Image (spheres, grey):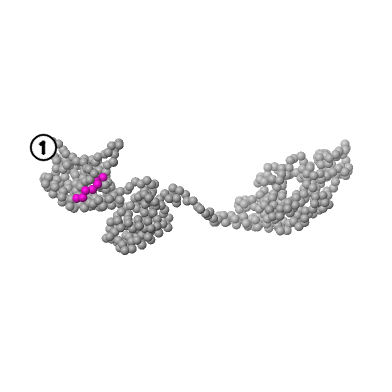
């Protein structure tokens, strides 16, 4: 039937093969009629495999070309297909039907759950098939001449299993169960390592690449635990000795173990780590000991500014020159070389609404207290100062609860300032004495104001003074026609308060002649 030409015969590849075939269609961009150098590019791409000689013949009357590459030792068909296809694609050739086809083809193992077969191709020298010369022109030939060309090309093509798999490692980028960047890293390392030695002076770099791949990815590529120590050194030596060109080109074979140990220590102490380890992207390193962080430059500058403000406030307190109002205090502090932005950034150190415990008490407290200077003393709590930069009310604060029906919002203990823990007994006594002293001032000022109202002759002011007296003096009944003298006689004169030094003098017992005036909650004015 073959001799009759009634049928065309083809063949498929098995698991092993002694040849590979390239099919170039007549309309392909790589056909000699379109590109005279295309087949030379193909030969140059396949040279790393050892395929340098081929047999050319037409595939049929259509004018397509088949290039046969025979070799002596049988090779795995799928590995050969992958290697040939990868080499051709790496040089920019399109391996697609109608342009350039490879037999055996790099097929999938199964298609739709059924094992797949390699593509089939026609046998040579059937109807329409002719041998071609070096210029790709048809020449006469029979099966005997074809066999002669086959054996000649087979003797020139030196393809072994070792070289085939070595080429696969070099040129084939394998998928791994790692991230995209890690997969690229592995393939780049493979491309450098698997080429081996091609000349002298390459040992240092190759050992470095081998050490890096073995340290970072050995457990990913080959399983097991990550390598370190002597196991890493042994792996570096074994890989280096198995690479092509080691015996011919490596000039450090007598000290390969020492060089491998040096590179193992280098990579272990570098920034590289075992892929997926606790220092990688999979887990966050757990610190066993707390790390004390040093303050940054900005933090040091901020602390220096705060210290400067503290010293300025302390100086103003010692000289009894700390202003009461915010603006005056701000201007006084700018005189110490402190910028306005720094002051408002750290206003908790100087602003009347924040200045509570941040300023140390002066070593020598003043011997007298002025009503307008109550804010000058750390131990004197100005309870009528608002805690906000913008006061909630513009009205004057009450001097004493005895003359006002408003609830004193500052009488709660939660609103009072606290003193340092040292010397709690004396500090509490000092605070109590100071509070009483301030209440005495408030009461004296208010009584003086009421006396002025009564002496003014203004009916409205006199009525307000009488109302306050009725509240402050139980049992006091104003006359039907009030005159000034009896009312003034009924009002007690302010009692001068004996000076009490809360720092140097002990706290007197309540009720003693030298005891301070009671708090505003007690009756200060009585009707006589």
Residue nearest the observer in this picture, 203 or 16: 16
Residue 218 visible in the picture = yes
Which SS does the magenta portion mostly show?
strand
Quarter in which the C terminus is drawn: top right
Residue 456 rendering spot, x and y as whole percentages: 83, 43
Residue 387 rendering spot, x and y as whole percentages: 67, 46
Please report the residue visible at 64 percent of the width from the left and 50 percent of the height from the top.
348
Circle 1: element type: loop
Residue 497 visible in the picture = no
Residue nearest the observer in this picture, 244 or 464: 244
| Count of all numbered marks drawn on residues in the image | 1
Residue 191 rendering spot, x and y as whole percentages: 32, 52
Please report the residue visible at 27 percent of the width from the left and 43 percent of the height from the top.
106
Tell me where residue 449 sits by quadrant: top right
Q: Which residue is mark 1?
A: 4
Quarter in which the N terminus is drawn: top left
Tell me where residue 308 sits by quadrant: bottom right
Magenta segment, which residues?
72-78
């Amino acid at each position: 039937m073959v001799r009759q030409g009634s049928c065309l015969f083809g063949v498929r590849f098995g698991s092993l093969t002694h040849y590979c075939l390239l099919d170039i269609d007549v309309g392909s961009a790589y056909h000699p009629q379109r590109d005279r150098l295309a087949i030379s590019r193909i030969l140059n791409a396949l040279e790393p495999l050892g395929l340098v000689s081929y047999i050319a013949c037409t595939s049929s009357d259509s004018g397509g070309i088949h290039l046969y590459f025979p070799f002596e030792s049988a090779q795995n068909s799928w590995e050969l297909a992958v290697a040939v296809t990868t080499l051709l694609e790496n040089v920019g050739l399109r391996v697609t039907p109608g342009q350039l086809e490879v037999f055996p083809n790099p097929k999938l193992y199964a298609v739709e759950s059924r094992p797949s077969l390699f593509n089939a191709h026609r046998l040579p020298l059937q109807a329409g098939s002719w041998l071609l010369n070096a210029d790709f022109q048809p020449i006469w030939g029979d099966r005997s001449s074809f066999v002669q060309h086959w054996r000649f090309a087979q003797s020139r093509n030196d393809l072994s299993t070792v070289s085939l798999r070595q080429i696969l490692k070099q040129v084939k980028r394998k998928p791994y169960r790692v991230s995209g960047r890690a997969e690229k890293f592995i393939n780049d390392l493979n491309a450098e390592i698997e080429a081996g030695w091609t000349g002298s002076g390459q040992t240092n770099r190759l050992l470095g690449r081998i050490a890096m791949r073995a340290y970072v990815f050995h457990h990913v590529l080959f399983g097991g635990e990550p390598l370190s120590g002597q196991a890493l050194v042994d792996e570096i030596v074994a890989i280096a000795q198995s690479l092509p060109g080691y015996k011919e080109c490596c000039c450090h074979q007598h000290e390969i173990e020492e060089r491998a140990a040096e590179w193992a220590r280098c990579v272990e102490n570098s920034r590289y780590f075992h892929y997926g380890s606790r220092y990688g992207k999979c887990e966050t390193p757990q610190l066993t000991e707390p790390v004390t962080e040093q303050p940054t430059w900005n933090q040091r500058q901020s602390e220096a500014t705060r210290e400067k403000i503290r010293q300025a406030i302390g100086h103003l307190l010692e000289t009894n020159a700390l202003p009461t109002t915010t603006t005056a205090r701000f201007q006084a502090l700018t005189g110490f070389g402190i910028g306005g932005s720094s002051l408002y950034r750290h206003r908790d150190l100087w602003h009347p609404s924040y200045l509570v415990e941040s300023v140390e008490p002066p070593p020598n407290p003043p011997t007298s207290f002025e009503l307008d200077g109550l804010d000058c003393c750390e131990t004197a709590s100005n309870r009528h100062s608002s805690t906000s930069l913008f006061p909630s009310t513009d009205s004057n604060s009450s001097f004493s609860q005895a003359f006002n029906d408003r609830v004193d919002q500052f009488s709660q203990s939660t609103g009072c300032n606290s003193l340092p823990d040292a010397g709690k007994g004396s500090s509490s006594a000092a605070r109590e004495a100071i509070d009483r002293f301030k209440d005495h001032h408030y009461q004296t000022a208010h009584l003086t104001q009421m006396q002025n109202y009564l002496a003014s002759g203004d009916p409205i002011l006199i009525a307000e003074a009488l109302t306050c007296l009725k509240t402050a003096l139980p049992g006091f009944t104003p006359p039907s026609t009030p005159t000034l003298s009896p009312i003034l006689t009924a009002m007690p004169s302010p009692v001068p308060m004996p000076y009490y030094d809360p720092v140097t003098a002990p706290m007197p017992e309540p009720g003693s002649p030298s005891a301070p005036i009671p708090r505003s909650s007690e009756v200060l004015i009585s009707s006589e």
